[in-house]
Amino acid sequence: MAAPLLPPVGLTVPPLTVPPLAAPLLAAPLLTVPAA
């Protein structure tokens, strides 16, 4: 869900440039899916 909400450019931009608020939003689903 977070992917479609954010522009594709955000995925290509290095994680260092991504705002601290966007990082957890993108990392949360990635960690939650395999954990489930």
Image: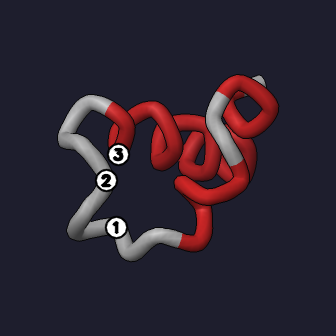
Q: Quadrant of the N terminus?
A: top right
- Write the residue at 22% across / 69% down: 16
Q: Label 3 is placed on what type of residue?
A: Ala
Residue 36 visible in the snapshot: no
C-alpha gap between disc 1 and disc 2: 5 Å
Position of residue 21 in the picture relative to residue 23 (left or right): left
Residue marked by disc 1:
15
Q: Label 2 is placed on what type of residue?
A: Val
The kind of secondary structure element at disc 3 is: helix
Q: Are marks 2 and 3 in contact (CB under 8 Å)?
A: yes
Q: Label 1 is placed on what type of residue?
A: Pro
Would you identify the image quadrant in which residue 2 lies?
A: top right
Residue marked by disc 2:
18
Per the rendering, the mark at residue 23 is: 3
Position of residue 34 in the picture relative to residue 29 (left or right): right
- Write the residue at 46% across / 70% down: 13
